[in-house]
Amino acid sequence: MKKGLKLTDILVTIIISLIFGLVYKLWGPLYGVVSTFGLHVEQLIYGMWFIAATVAFLIIRKPGVALLAEVAAAHGEFIFGGEWGVVTLIFGIGQGLAAELVFAAFGYKRFNVFVVSLAGIGSAFASIAIDYYYGYIGDLALWNLLLMFGARIIGAIVISGIFAYLIVAALEKTGVTNLVRPASNSDYRALD
């Protein structure tokens, strides 16, 4: 099994990412509505902005896919008129790199809910660092920052971890993933 990305891998990743870019654009107003409840409840749905990387990686299963997916999804959100503008691209790069590092730590050979949840957590760490750099959270009291971070991690696990895994599992049952994967699930398990 070759690990390099083929043109088909890149195109499928970008299509997945553009779909999630539109979802991200539509997610922004929902995030705004949920934020009115206070106590960082909106952070529980923040994990949606990490899902392109995990879904694309679970489908394509090659190095570089998570970064490409998150960057392309951020571009999609920006092109579709996302409310955060060009800063979205910085978040896409940071979140994609963080997810990619997690998948690399497992040798790109683990495709389970635990690993994709860790990738979501990695993306959450990256997004918090970028939020801090831009001054979005620098004035928060420690308890408030911990509450926000805890809620964001929970959202990352639930949405970009568990939900992403379930989406791809459902796609696998339809046979769609066999069209883009060079090997079956049993072939991947044999690598372990």
Image: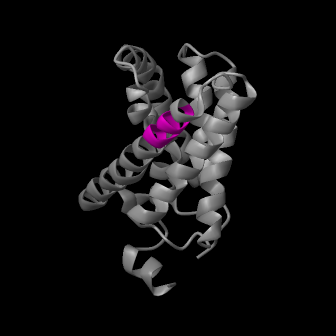
The quadrant the N terminus occupies is bottom right
Image-quadrant location for residue 141: top right
Given residues 36 and 160, the one toward you in this image is: 36
Identify the residue at image location x=47%, y=39%: 152
Identify the residue at image location x=69%, y=39%: 93
Give the vertical position of 153 relative to 180 (above or below). above
Give the vertical position of 11 relative to 30 (above or below). below
What coloring was used for the rendering?
A: one colour
Whether residue 188 is in magenta: the answer is no
Identify the residue at image location x=35%, y=53%: 162
Residue 27 percent coordinates (x, y): 41, 23
Report how many numbered discs are placed on residues in the image.
0
Residue 54 percent coordinates (x, y): 49, 51
- Left or right of 189, for residue 64: right
Give the vertical position of 132 relative to 80 (above or below). below
Give the vertical position of 103 relative to 49 (above or below). below
Residue 36 in sight from this viewpoint: yes
Residue 8 in sight from this viewpoint: no
Residue 53 percent coordinates (x, y): 53, 47
Main secondary structure type of the part rendered in magenta? helix
Q: What stretch is highlighted in magenta?
A: 145-152
Whether residue 149 is in magenta: the answer is yes
Given residues 42 and 139, the one toward you in this image is: 139
- Left or right of 68, for residue 157: left
Residue 99 percent coordinates (x, y): 59, 52
| Residue most extreme to the right | 133
Identify the residue at image location x=47%, y=27%: 24
